Amino acid sequence: MLLTIRNLTKSYNGGPTAVEVLRSVDLDMEKGELAGIYGASGTGKSTLLHIVGGLDRPTAGSVSFEGTDLSKMGEKRLAAFRNRSIGFVFQFYHLLPEFTALENAMMPCLIAGMKRREARELALKAIEEVGLGHRASHRPGEMSGGEQQRVALARAAVMQPKLILADEPTGNLDRETGERVFDYLMRLHAEYKISMLIVSHNQELLNVLPRKLLLKDGKLNAL
């Protein structure tokens, strides 16, 4: 089993009472699995992904990756785990504006201590796979939103992680561009068999996925 979530709860202190965002969430994902989580804005989808990716800690419950509980990892080990095993795709890209598309895609490799030449080769391959080889030397400010998101996909996939977490990957794009970006996500999954957990408030987009889940009232159920 790649991912095992048990009794996951997340609450925030909101004045005199705690606000419970996630309530006893359970989820299992196999290696190579492709799944989508649908839910309206504000239902906790991003919170769930952040906890799964080790960017946030749950109030209660556990997240285990290949049998290892993330809560047992110290911050340094957790950061190394995220860089090597998890790829993140966010709604607003989070590219570094002063670097080119190629340099942005190289970042996970360089953080992992890879030699610059090898990092460049892997990043160029990833950039070409999302159809942007001709834009490799351009900076984010010189690219469209769809192109920036494809650079973010290349960055997420460059280390061939075991899991990609995509948080509203098309939410900031028009319909046609969003569908194109989603198609590239599917191509990366088909090429590398990377497990993917994609969250969106667009149920129509997720309908093509083999497994669909609904996050509502803090609980996760099959859709």
Image: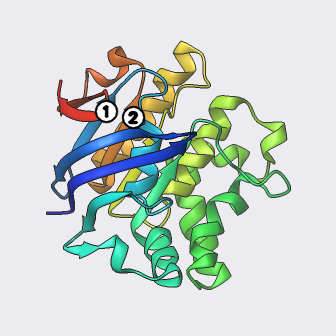
Q: Residues within 10 Å of mark 2 (few under 14, many from 20)?
A: many
The kind of residue on which mark 2 rests is Val
Residue that mark 1 sits on: 37
Q: Which image quadrant is residue 85 in?
A: bottom left
Q: Is residue 155 shown left or right of residue 148? A: left
Query: Where in the figure is residue 187, as x and y percent of width and height?
Result: 36, 41
Image quadrant where residue 199 sits = top left
Q: Amino acid at mark 1?
A: Ile
User: In the image, is 174 to the left or to the right of 198?
Assistant: right
Task: Please name the residue that numbered disc 2 is placed on.
Answer: 199
> How many residues crowd mark 1 within 10 Å: few (<14), some (14–19), many (20+)?
many
Q: Disc 1 or 2, which lies upstream in sequence?
A: 1
Give the SS element for disc 2: strand
**Picture mark count:** 2
Q: Residue at x 41, y 55 (%)?
A: 51
**Residue 191 image offset from top left, x and y in percent:** 32, 51
Whether pointer 1 and pointer 2 mark residues with C-beta atoms closer than 8 Å, the reply is yes
